Amino acid sequence: MPLLSKNSFFSFICSGFVFSFPFMAEEFVIVPDWLANIFQFSFVTAMRVDSWFTDFHAVTIFGYPLLLPIAASLVLLLVSAFFTIMLYKVHRQKQIQQ
């Protein structure tokens, strides 16, 4: 893991991939419907919110309908919290080792 955290250029490339891959895949490649549904919950889609509010979309979670803007916000919040916790743990472990 030290190789991943010390090389800032590699971190920049990985972060750019996380942001750009779903957008590029939707725009330039024909993706299956199930993958397009997953890409609805990407960070780039979260920044383009007009598609969330122009049409009525609901997502079924545990048998209950949930509006897409609420579901996407919750998923992005959970994913962001997960990555923040992982970053904190890696950073704390790195500080103890040094």
Image: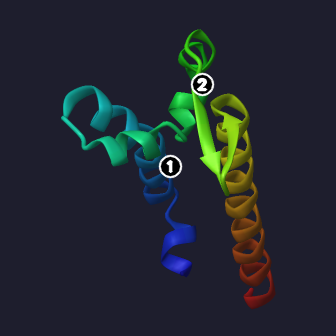
In this rendering, is residue 23 above or below 37?
A: above
Q: Quadrant of residue 82?
A: bottom right
x, y percent for residue 19? 47, 40
Q: Residue at x 65, y 51 (%)?
A: 61
Res 41 quadrant in image: top right
Residue name at image x 70 percent, y 66 percent: 87
Q: Residues within 10 Å of mark 2 (few under 14, many from 20)?
A: few
> What's the residue at 67%, 45% (across, down)?
76
User: Mark 2 vs mark 1: which is more N-terminal?
Assistant: 1
In the displayed image of the protein, which residue is found farthest to the front?
63
Please, what is the three-letter code of the amino acid marked with disc 1? Ser
Q: Nearer the viewer, mark 2 or mark 1?
A: 2
Residue 55: where, in percent of width, then height? Answer: 55, 14
Q: CA distance from mark 2 to mark 1?
A: 16 Å
Q: Quick check: 54 left or right of 63?
A: left
Task: Please identify the quadrant where the C terminus is shown.
Answer: bottom right
**At which x and y percent is residue 35?**
35, 47
Identify which residue, 19 or 13, lies in the foreground: 19
Quarter holding residue 67: top right
Give the number of callouts: 2
Which mark is on residue 96?
none
State the residue in front, 61 or 9: 61
Residue pointed to by mark 2: 47
What residue is drawn where x is 72% and y is 55%? 78
Location of mark 1 (residue): 15
45 relative position to 58: left or right:
left
Amino acid type shown at disc 2: Met
Q: Taking 97 as reference, is 9 left or right?
A: left
